Amino acid sequence: MGERNEFRRPRLIRFSDCDPAGIVFYPQYFVMLNGLVEDWVNEGLGLSYHGLVAQRRIGLPTVKLEVDFRAVSRMGDQVMLGLAVERLGSRSMTLQVRCFDPVDGEVRMQMQQVLVTTSLETHRAVAIPDDMRAAIVRNAPELG
């Protein structure tokens, strides 16, 4: 998927993101990028993440991660987080997610993440809700 379909959010690297060496402690990227998924559902897709999880009882658990850490991010850095849908299945989606320098484009870390839509009642995979699928395809017509 090209950058034109990438959902982006700027992010300041905070003290709480870093280890004693002053660089992002790698699990903190997962926290940041989970927040990006929530923002993408809310703002990028125009759905309510809270409504999806708390009211509709649809979960989006991660079932696979493949991560490359390419360069360090330090406390005080302004970075850009980006998310693009690479593949849309019937009950899962593959995301390309990255953290990069918004000025020179240097990729700090990138990840391929597979999310599965599940029932929070049965904890089994369910079809991606129609409104979610339609919103994803609206933003990335090549997936339809």
Image (cartoon, rainbow, N blue to C red):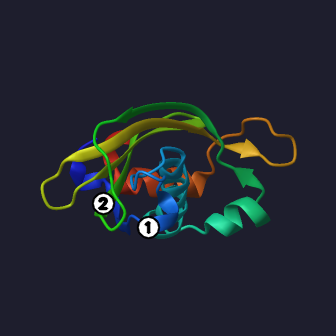
Question: Which residue is depicted at the point 66% across and 40% down?
Answer: 127
Question: Which residue is depicted at the point 31% across and 54% down?
Answer: 6
What x and y, as percent, mark residue 45? 47, 63
Separation of disc 1 and disc 2 at Cα?
14 Å
Residue nearest the observer in this picture, 26 or 81:
26
43 sits left or right of 139 in the view: right
Q: Quadrant of the N terminus?
A: top left
Residue 80 visible in the shown view = yes
Question: Which residue is depicted at the point 30% across and 64% down?
Answer: 77
What x and y, as percent, mark residue 36? 47, 59
Q: Quadrant of the C terminus?
A: top left
Q: Is residue 129 above or below residue 126?
A: below
What x and y, as percent, mark residue 86? 38, 37
**Label at residue 80:** 2
19 sits left or right of 73 in the view: right
Residue nearest the observer in this picture, 49 or 74:
74
**Label at residue 31:** none
Q: Which residue is mark 1?
A: 14
Describe the element under mark 1 as helix, strand or loop: loop
